[in-house]
Image (cartoon, rainbow, N blue to C red):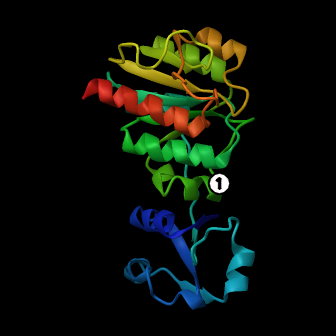
Amino acid sequence: MVNIEGRNPVREALRVGRVKRLFVAKEAGKKGISDILEAAKEQRIPVVFLDKQELLRRAQTQVHQGVIAEAEPIQTYELPRWLAEIKEDRDAVVLVLDELTDPRNFGSLLRTADAAGVSGCVIPRRRGAGITPVVEKASAGAAQYIPVIEVPNLVSTLKILKEEGFWLYGADVDAPRHLYSGLDFSGRVALVIGAEGKGLRRLVKEQCDFLVSIPMKGNIQSLNASVAGALFMYEILRSRL
């Protein structure tokens, strides 16, 4: 079992039937969470009321908003299973994270990916953020709607994606070609985002068909990974509307 913390993530987990038990702050009463309590009642989920300090001891984040769910963990995908599911989708977009370690960035990217219609998110099995309560909270519940594909080797996976018809676009701060330079994002697209502070690793860069930067006019010459990823995902969506 895992913790899901915060009102929106708990609502989404209830919607898909993952929740097994709820912990609610006594002080919260029913204000703002009446729908959560009603859903728990309909699904016959036990609700335990705890005082503020007891709930805080159970929490893994500082932003539980008075509600914590004990739930089934999100099941990640193996690459072959995910590829089989999108076999007929010739316009699929997949987000690939190269050793991204900040769970808040990961969660934020999943939230944007869900909003932008992305088909999945590839992460390395090791040396990167996995799905945690912080990720679920930052994603506002979107973590359970975007298939997360864990792979043992990212470089090998990029080669497989190429074989499956994906064009690989790497976000790279030093790339001479920028995001708004008339790129053709039709067909299958894999958007590769690097780790905070380090960017894309050399071997990952070498697999990309295109390296693309975001034009910067100010004094700070880099963007948060989740912001950069959001700009790329929405530019892909904009180009297809």
Residue under the image location 34 percent in, 17 percent down: 187
Q: What residue is shown at x 41% (from left), y 28% (from top)?
A: 93
36 shown above or below 131: below
**Residue 86 appearing in the image:** no
Q: Quadrant of the C terminus?
A: top left
- The foreground one among 46 and 111 is 111
At 44% from the left edge and 85% from the top edge, which residue is drawn? 31
Secondary element type, mark 1: loop
Considering every residue shown, the one lying at the far left of the view is 241
Q: At which x and y percent is residue 221?
A: 64, 26
User: Vertically, is 162 above or below 189?
Assistant: above
11 left or right, relative to 220: left
- Horizontal and vertical percent position of residue 204: 65, 16
Answer with left or right where residue 123 lies relative to residue 236.
Answer: right
Question: In this figure, what is the number of numbered marks?
Answer: 1
The relative height of residue 77 versus residue 155 in the rendered view (above or below) is below
Q: In this figure, which residue is indicated by the disc labeled 1? A: 132
Q: Residues within 10 Å of mark 1 (few under 14, many from 20)?
A: many
Point 73% across, 26% down: residue: 198
Residue 194, how many percent across, how many down? 64, 27
Q: Using the image as rendered, state which of residue 211 and residue 164 is in the foreground.
A: 211
Q: Amino acid at mark 1?
A: Thr
Quadrant in which the N terminus is drawn: bottom right
Q: Can I make out residue 39 in this image?
A: yes
Query: In the picture provided, is 59 more to the left or to the right than 16?
Result: right
